[in-house]
Image (cartoon, grey):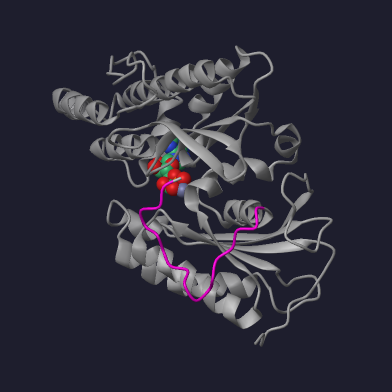
Amino acid sequence: MAVISKHKSAGFKVLGIETSCDETSVALLEVRGTTQPPARGTRYAVQLLHHETATQIPIHRRYGGVVPEVAARTHIAEVIKLLERADIFASEKQGFDAIAVTQGPGLATALRVGIEAARTLAYLTDVPIVGVNHLEGHLASAWLVPENREHWRFPVLVLLVSGGHSELVLMKDFCSYKVVGRTRDDASGEAFDKTAKLMGLSYPGGPILSRYAAKGNPEAYGLPRPMIHDPSLDMSFSGLKTAVRNLIHDLGPKVPEVLPDLCASIQAAIVDVLVNKTSRAIMAYKPKCLAVVGGVSANPHLQAELRKAASEHPGLIMLEPPKGFYTDNAAMIAAAGAWRLAQGKKDDWKKIDAKPELDL
Ligand code: KG4
Ligand code: ZN
């Protein structure tokens, strides 16, 4: 029985909820021109009606990384506040027609907060609920840009680079993915964060390291590019971390003085590997579009090098998330939810549960 009334309008509104790691986020995304779940293959106008993210970064910074139990407790406090501020029950303009929630991968206790909030809302409102793969969400972040939706052609090659994942994915259709390359150890975001930590930079190190790198010489220190000559599309970053640890040991007290050069050299090594593997994948799969998504796609050096590499392939269109939507957010979860609903996929609120190890 629905105890909270929903408000209908000209569009189909998807409420997105994200709590997989250290950002609590709620979004309301409207797919225009339909009051039904969007039909497969149809290109709709999309409007973000509301979006708010509460970051936990300052809390976890004290511990040098994400503490799962602290993350879950903070999500509980934040998700209710964010849902209230989304004004989903109050005004004529608001309301929602479906709920999309991150199901995994991520921290089990953190994911469960979003799932429980979403299934309670689904029970109360009787609207469909759909569990979203966080990685598919990152991919859908590029779909939030109107020009990207216009130019979106399959196959799309996706470089997915985040704190927990570094993967090359071939997207053959909406919701159809093949992982063609992946890291064999650390993710590229982890490589940024762990080497930054070795240099005494705070959490998360990626954005801080990249700011120092902008002022440094990328050729100052010769660091390894693991697996760069390997013909496979797999990557590895743990050897780089060891090399940086040894270099820092050798530099000793000189580290603060040479920090920009050190950061630029580390960044160059990570970006070289990512760009080299992406170029190989473009040659192997001849995609029509190249999407670069996930937190590390915020890195300006990576963006510039990939644009350069893409420009060597006439006709290849590069798809990037809108500024500010590189890292975790609920708008991308709502967008991926719309894709899933368009394919007739939905979940049962009684059964949906977190899947911390979910893969694409
Ligand atoms: O996608 P995301 O928000 O969370 C996960 O799903 O993991 O990605 C977070 C990662 C962190 O490792 C962070 O250091 C990295 O993205 N990151 C960056 C930059 N901004 C965020 N890495 C390099 N350069 C940046 N500008
Ligand atoms: Zn993420």
Seen from the viewer's position, the closer of residues 223 and 183 is 183
- Which residue is outermost to the front? 344
The number of numbered badges drawn on the structure is 0
Taking the magenta stretch, the answer to whether it contains residue 346 is yes
Residue 62 position within the rendered picture, expressed as x and y whole percent measured from the top left: 30, 57
Residue 298 position within the rendered picture, expressed as x and y whole percent measured from the top left: 52, 36
Is 179 above or below relative to 329?
Answer: above
Seen from the viewer's position, the closer of residues 285 and 8 is 285
Left or right of 7: which side holds 56?
left
Is 19 above or below relative to 228?
Answer: below
The residue that appears at 46% across and 21% down in the rendered structure is: 275
Residue 331 position within the rendered picture, expressed as x and y whole percent measured from the top left: 61, 54
Is 129 above or below relative to 320?
Answer: below
The residue that appears at 41% across and 55% down in the rendered structure is: 57
Seen from the viewer's position, the closer of residues 262 and 79 is 79
Residue 143 position within the rendered picture, expressed as x and y whole percent measured from the top left: 66, 42
Is 66 above or below relative to 217?
Answer: below
Q: Quadrant of residue 120?
A: bottom right
Asked if one can make out residue 24 in the rendered structure from this viewpoint, the answer is no
Taking the magenta stretch, the answer to whether it contains residue 65 is no
Q: Main secondary structure of the magenta part?
A: loop
Q: Quadrant of the N terminus?
A: bottom right
Seen from the viewer's position, the closer of residues 114 and 284 is 284
The residue that appears at 55% across and 49% down in the rendered structure is: 137
The residue that appears at 74% across and 58% down in the rendered structure is: 30
Left or right of 315: which side holds 303?
left
Q: Quadrant of residue 22?
A: bottom left
Give the magenta range: 343-359
Asked if one can make out residue 335 in the rendered structure from this viewpoint, the answer is yes
